[in-house]
Image (cartoon, grey):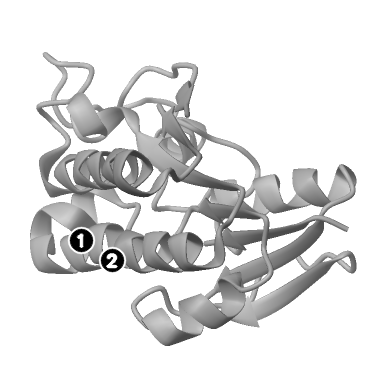
Amino acid sequence: MTRAIVFGGSGFIGSYVADQLSQRGYDVVVADIRETPYPNADQTFVRCDIMEPDAVNDVIAGAEFVFNFAGLADLDESIHEPRLTMQLNVLGNVHLLEAVRTHGVRRFVYASSAYAFSPKGSFYGISKLTSEKLVEEYAERFGLPYTIIRYGSVYGERADHHNGMYRLLRQAIENGEIRLRDPARRCGSTFMPPMRPSCRSM
């Protein structure tokens, strides 16, 4: 059975991807620092911190596909935590890339963001764009097959208070109105119109 590792598989988007992979017959390993709140009998959970390269290397050994949904995903938090944002989103991604290269993984899938090219992305957007460039450079230098998916505003049943759409919808339900942080610019840090994810591969 083909093994797929989903780093950040306990989170919002990662957990959905892990479930879809299981439904399609993959041997799925969810690798995260916290146990998944969406247990699936067809999946294996491994506690793993992307900041620990040896642990990352051990988890990836034997995998054919590796997905990276791990790191800091809250735009507002990243504004106040630039160093942590770069450590988790950039250096953490490098740890995965190194292990993927070492073990000859068939494909690396990186979850990026529409904020990568947005002037309102702050440190979060910078970290995502930097990681995209790193993935592309690994592909150029080492022949790493990859897919980068640049998500826009996402929402769903598993979203929590870190998700901008979740906050807006909850506000509307509880207060009967939506208050934008910057009403003159509807693409401010609190709100971006829903958009389809863009994707590119090599």
Q: Is residue 79 left or right of residue 178?
A: left
| In the image, residue 29 above or below residue 121 | below
Residue 145 visible in the snapshot: yes
Identify the residue position indicated by label 2 in the image. Answer: 88
Q: Residue at x 35, y 26 (%)?
A: 178
User: Judging from the image, what secondary structure is the residue with disc 2 in?
Assistant: helix
Q: Residue at x 66, y 67 (%)?
A: 30
Amino acid marked by disc 2: Leu
Q: CA distance from mark 2 to mark 1?
A: 5 Å
Identify the residue position indicated by label 1 in the image. Answer: 85
In the rendered view of the protein, which quadrant contains the N terminus?
bottom right
At which x and y percent is residue 106?
A: 61, 48
Pick the residue in front: 186 or 201.
Answer: 201
| In the image, residue 119 above or below residue 131 | above
Mark 2 is surrounded, within 10 Å at the Cα level, by few (under 14), some (14 to 19) or many (20 or more) other residues, namely many
Pick the residue in front: 74 or 117.
Answer: 117
> Is mark 2 in CB contact (under 8 Å) with mark 1?
yes
Q: Residue at x 77, y 47 (%)?
A: 21
At which x and y percent is residue 92?
A: 32, 66
At which x and y percent is residue 123?
A: 12, 48
Q: Is residue 130 left or right of residue 161?
A: left
| In the image, residue 61 above or below residue 120 | below
